[in-house]
Image (cartoon, rainbow, N blue to C red):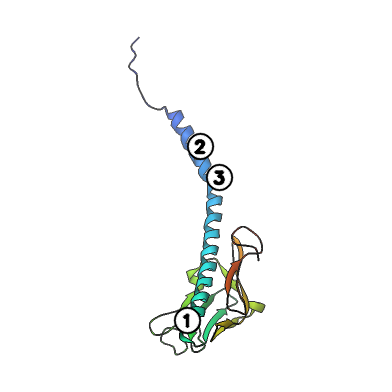
Amino acid sequence: MDETGHAGFTLIELLITLALIALLAALAAPAMSQFAERGRLRGAAELLAQDLRAARQRTLAVQQPVYFNFATSPAGDWCYGWRAGGSCDCRAGAAASDACGEGDARQRRLAADFPRLALRLPGNAARFELRFAPPRALATAASLRLSGGAGEARVVVSPLGRVRVCAERGRLFAPC
């Protein structure tokens, strides 16, 4: 007998390997989807908290009131924005006199920036205005809720102007 010593895989071995890879991918897909949803919720809540802290810092820097405005619609569309010295409308275009921001700086965020996330305002209102007042940047107390497929996060503003993020349940944030 002639032994040629062929190296390689048989067709059966390759098919079994591909079937195992497909099975593992099918099991991992839901976990990856949930991971992405948690990341989206965490990012949105932390960005909202960061924007609120920036508005508070602006109050301390310029010693003018800063107005942080929120708007929601029954269709699930929402936005928020802020401006020093006067109220603003986050739904207004850049050229509008009541647009959020100062000069070329646009301080606003839209629901389109956070797909599949909903924002609930205090009292389920359609509009809400939070004010940071000088000299110590005291604020209108508020609890804002962001929710999505991964759960819900609350961004809480205390009367002292301090901002924190928490969650009722889950491990995404510290408990409220």
Q: Position of residue 40 (x, y in %)?
A: 52, 62
Does residue 161 appear left or right of residue 82 in this picture? right
Q: Quadrant of residue 119?
A: bottom right
Q: Tell me how far mark 3 sits from mark 2, CA to CA.
A: 11 Å
Q: Which one is in front, 55 or 105?
A: 55
Q: Which one is in front, 159 or 31?
A: 159
Placement of the C terminus among the 4 image quadrants: bottom right
User: Which residue is found at the position 49% from the left and 79% from the top?
Assistant: 57
Please identify the residue farthest to the top as the structure is shown: 1
Placement of the N terminus among the 4 image quadrants: top left
Chain-order first, disc 3 or disc 2:
2
Does residue 78 appear left or right of residue 143 in this picture? left
Secondary-structure class at tag 1: helix
Q: Report if residue 90 is visible in the image.
A: no
Residue type at tag 1: Arg
Residue type at tag 2: Leu
Residue type at tag 3: Leu
Q: Which residue is mark 2?
A: 20
Q: Which one is in front, 12 or 77?
A: 77
User: Which residue is found at the position 48% from the left and 84% from the top?
Assistant: 83
Does residue 113 appear left or right of residue 146 in this picture? left
Q: Tell me how far mark 1 sits from mark 2, CA to CA.
A: 56 Å
Secondary-structure class at tag 3: helix
Q: Quadrant of residue 172?
A: bottom right
Residue 41 against residue 62 in the figure, above or below: above
Q: Which residue is mark 3?
A: 27
Chain-order first, disc 1 or disc 3:
3
Secondary-structure class at tag 2: helix
Disc marking residue 58 = 1
Which mark is in front, 1 or 3?
1
Q: Position of residue 170 (x, y in %)?
A: 63, 58
User: Total of numbered circles in the picture?
Assistant: 3
